[in-house]
Amino acid sequence: MMSDPFEQMVRPQMDFLYGLAVRLCGDRTGAEDLVQDALLRAFRAFPALRNREHPRLWLTRVLTSAFHDRLRAQGPDLVDVGADLEFDLFDRITEEDPFPYSDRVHLDFLELFDDAKILEVLQALHPRLRTALILAYVYGFTAREIGEILSQPLGTVLAWLHRARKQLERELWEYASTRHLLTSRMEARV
């Protein structure tokens, strides 16, 4: 039986935290280190935590903060997605027609990717964009909640989500093209 309030709050969130950390870091070792760092930070901050009604939101904030602190320690935080903003996956698929006679070309394209491939492509995204995208589309946080988690204004989060989607589209296309996942007819045109 758990009697420690911190443990009672954290234990049910462990699988969630580890899953998020794996998606952010891209590897299990980095994820384990990140979760450990986040839990230590959370433990230290727990006595001052006034609102304990939303532990997942708070722990997500702690974990993503730890992740971004690690990134800052590695070097400058530059986001350049100018070309990605002009790329439109749906238009490219429609123009190139890699799936002739399909009424669902965009879904056919996405079916080329299993979970491991998607995770690999996600790692190519800028970490801030990847974080926003994962929080929104994998874990279902609203843009407002993501802003709270990342301590960013709503407009910034919305811009990050837009850029992340565009960059993901481009990365998926490049991944599929370079790994010969598209038809040979399609590759001849690219």
Image: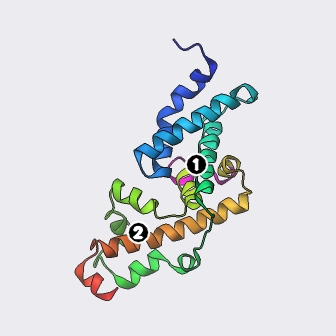
Circle 1 residues within 10 Å: few <14, some 14–19, many ≥20: many
Amino acid at dot 2: Leu
Instruction: Tell me the quarter of the picture where residue 53 sits.
Output: top right
Q: Position of residue 64 (x, y in %)?
A: 60, 47
Amino acid at dot 1: Phe
Q: Which residues are magenta?
A: 136-144
Q: Residue furthest bottom?
A: 189
Q: Secondary structure at mark 1?
A: helix
As displayed, is residue 141 above or below residue 101? Answer: above
As displayed, is residue 139 above or below residue 4? Answer: below
Compute the Cα span from label 2 to label 1.
24 Å
Circle 2 residues within 10 Å: few <14, some 14–19, many ≥20: many
Residue 143 sits inside the magenta stretch: yes
The residue drawn where x is 59% and y is 78% is 82
Checking the image for residue 67, the label placed there is 1
Q: Circle 2 is placed at which residue position?
A: 172
